[in-house]
Image: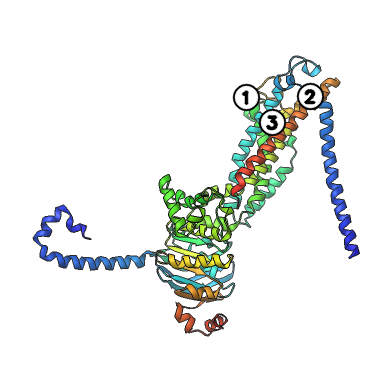
Amino acid sequence: MRLKFIEEKIAKGLMVVASLAVFAFVVNIIYTIFRRGFPALNWEMISQIPAGGYYNGGGGGILNAIIGSLYIVLGSTFLGLLISIPVVFYLNVYLKKDSKLAYVARLAFDVLFGIPSIVYGAFAFTIMIYLGMHTSLGGGILVITLLVIPIFIRSMDEVAQQLPKDLLDSTYALGATKLETIKVVLRQIAPGIATATLLSVGRAIGDAAGVMFTAGFTDSIPTSLGQPAATLPLSVFFQLSSPNADVQDRAYSAALILIFIVLVISILGRLITNHFSKHKI
Amino acid sequence: MKFLYRNPTRASWAEDYSFLNNDLDKSAKEKLEKDKEGLRIKKSYLKVSDLNIYIHKAHILKNVNIEIPDKKITCIIGPSGCGKSTLLKTFNRLIDDTEGIKYEGSILVDDTDIFDKKTEITDIRKKMGLLSQRPCPLPMSIYDNIAFGCKMHGERNRKKLNEIVEEQLKAVGLWEEVKNRLHAPASKLSIGQQQRLCLARGLAVEPEFILADEATSALDPISSKHIEELFVKLKQDYTIILVTHTLRQALRIADHVIFMYLGEVIEAGPADEVFNNPKQELTRKYLEGAFS
């Protein structure tokens, strides 16, 4: 009795310590970014593209990178959803539970999940050369789509595997073909789709290595898929590499903007999820 | 039939030969009645012949030969694992998705073999409303739960859909309870209401059979009584096949009983015959629990 009591205390203590450690890290990171970035943050940074000599302390802002990142995130999330939903649907509705194809596919997506983005970048770059493409917004969207597809598929798949068999059976019993069950399946896994989207957006907006070769970097805002596009992480990288302390502080401001964008997207995502999952069984 | 004789093109003919008319009318009527009778039986006729089902190498159903009477409640009873649910799920071929399934024999519905390669599986399923053990509403609003099936089968007219939803909710006695919150999530209903909603959803696609797989076992006594009463009411229009664990339930509502044991049909017949005067020793032994 006494021993159990101590055991409980120790276990609880360890859990609290672990949670606090994680929390401390996050607070520390945000604090550092905030401390260095907030004083340097101003409206000019958000609303203007870099003026001449920006990276040596000149005027202007990083609107090019903000817009470029948003373009890439939106494009790749849209394409990623378009490709992953049919895959998840096929894996879970068409294939039987112990299908070998499903097993191999899941394994493959797990492996893809772990491949560093620089490898995707290099891979996409060779394809782009083969196709005669230059570094461009289109190329950036392409590589980030490749990067987020495994995230989409694996996180949606985890939820879709929990689909109640009774639910599918009930739908079939009404005379539905497998394809016609998609309406039911999508509504049931809506929270999973939302979580997957949030994870993907986080990865897509924060990736620097993948877009380095493919989207390139530019000081202007792209007006077509064929033009190069700047991204926030690369913008942070270039400013941090400056010896000038003012420019380094601007890098922290850019990071702050990036965190803010992720925060807004997450909150929006949660709201949308709540709206769509109210019917979940 | 009358309209035939009021047909203007035949009016004079009918007048001229009015003396024949009565006789013709009578025999034609009889013939029609007969046809109708024939049609009625044929309409939802279900006959299982030499059905064998194997899952991997296990022999799940052995030589099942039964006929399900039309517009009656047929209860399939038997101990757990005797193949009752498998048999039920074979009727609408939900069993197809089971790994390693193999079947022999035939099940005739309306003279079409449901195992025939030419038979559209969705047509069979549309004919068989399914009520599962746990109520399983679709992840939609109450309204959409019922409209879903109709929309899927091509009904797009809003007004018509509204009518169907109201009609079916009334048929299961749910209309008064939910008419003010038709667009609320179906998952917010109580479990008994959910089961009635599932029944209404099944009825909305105009089936001929209702397959119920222990449909009341997850419900509280009042809700299950409600469902039982519905079955008794619905048997005027539908053929109801009910798998049940509760012998008392079978006693209360069955018209026809099929007793299964280890994948075989031991005895099948009208309810009073099977319950009061079982021919097989096994049936008698199984039923003793219920009567004592």
Q: Residue at x 62, y 26 (%)?
A: A225
Q: Amino acid at mark 1?
A: Gly
Q: Quadrant of the N terminus of chain A?
A: bottom right
Mark nearer the viewer, 3 or 1: 1
Residue placed under numbered mark 1 in the picture: A226
Q: Secondary structure at mark 3?
A: helix
What residue is pinned by disc 3? A125
- Few, some or many residues within 10 Å of mark 1 (<14, 14–19, 20+): some
Local SS, label 2: helix
Q: Amino acid at mark 2?
A: Phe
Q: Which of the two discs, 2 and 3, sits closer to the camera? A: 2
Residue A82 placed where, x, y %?
A: 59, 39
Determine if marks 2 and 3 fall on one subunit: yes
Q: Amino acid at mark 3?
A: Phe
Which mark sits nearer the N-terminus, 2 or 1? 1
Does mark 1 fall on the same chain as mark 3? yes
Q: Which mark is residue A5?
A: none
Residue at horizontal 54%, vertical 66%? B224
Is residue B198 visible in the rendered structure shown here?
yes
Residue B282 position within the rendered picture, expressed as x and y whole percent measured from the top left? 54, 83
Residue ID for mark 2: A238
Front residue of B223/A113: it is B223
The Cα–Cα distance between marks 2 and 3, rounded to whole angstroms, is 21 Å
